[in-house]
Amino acid sequence: MLKRTLIAGAAVATGLVFVAPAATGQSQTCDRRQKVLGYLESAYQEARIATGVTSTDGLVEVLAGSKGDTWTIVVSSPDGTTCLVAAGEGWRAIQTDPPPPEPHA
């Protein structure tokens, strides 16, 4: 299996663009949301397994391959731009016990 620690190089090779955030001085791989999600689905068979909303109305999404072999975290801004935040291998979902029932008053 191909080792994957960062998806940025492969994403650039398929036409995703680099955008440099002014505040951090670091570059991120960003493009339109549908293009990023389509690439992750076709190249790595990744699908969304978790989502959340940030305090600045960004959409955080965790994607993983069905066998847990790869995973990616992306953040989408309200304008539809999606940036790759992190990617790796060996995703494992953690099984947790449900919380105890609320006591009746």
Image (cartoon, grey):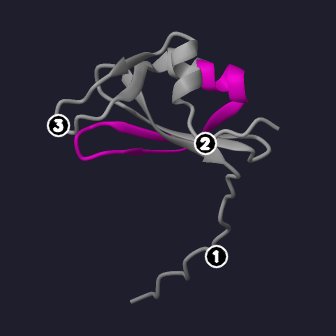
Q: Amino acid at mark 1?
A: Asp
Image quarter hosting the C terminus: bottom left
Horizontally, residue 52 falls left or right of residue 35, namely left
Residue 8 in percent (x, y) is at: 51, 28
Q: In the rendered image, which residue does mark 3 sit on?
A: 23
Label 3 Cα crowd, 10 Å radius (few <14 / some 14-19 / many 20+):
few
Residue 98 in percent (x, y) is at: 60, 74
> In 3D space, how far apart are the residues under numbered discs 1 and 3 (Cα atoms)?
40 Å
Residue at 66% x, 25% y: name it: 41
Of tags 1 and 3, the one toward the viewer is: 3
Image quarter hosting the N terminus: top right
Q: In the rendered image, which residue does mark 1 sit on?
A: 97
Q: Amino acid at mark 2?
A: Thr
Q: In the rendered image, which residue does mark 2 sit on?
A: 5
In which quarter of the view is residue 33 placed? top left
Q: Let me know if residue 49 appears in the view.
A: no
Residue at 55% x, 21% y: name it: 11
Vertical side of 54 occupied by 103: above or below: below
Which residue occupies the extreme top position in the image?
15
The segment highlighted magenta reads 39-61
Residue at 65% x, 65% y: name it: 94
Q: Report if residue 50 lies within the magenta region.
A: yes
Q: Earlier in the sequence, mark 2 or mark 1?
A: 2
Of tags 2 and 1, the one toward the viewer is: 2
Residue 62 in percent (x, y) is at: 54, 43
Q: Nearer the viewer, residue 13 or 95?
A: 13
Check disc 3 and report its element: helix, strand or loop: loop
Q: Are marks 2 and 3 in contact (CB under 8 Å)?
A: no
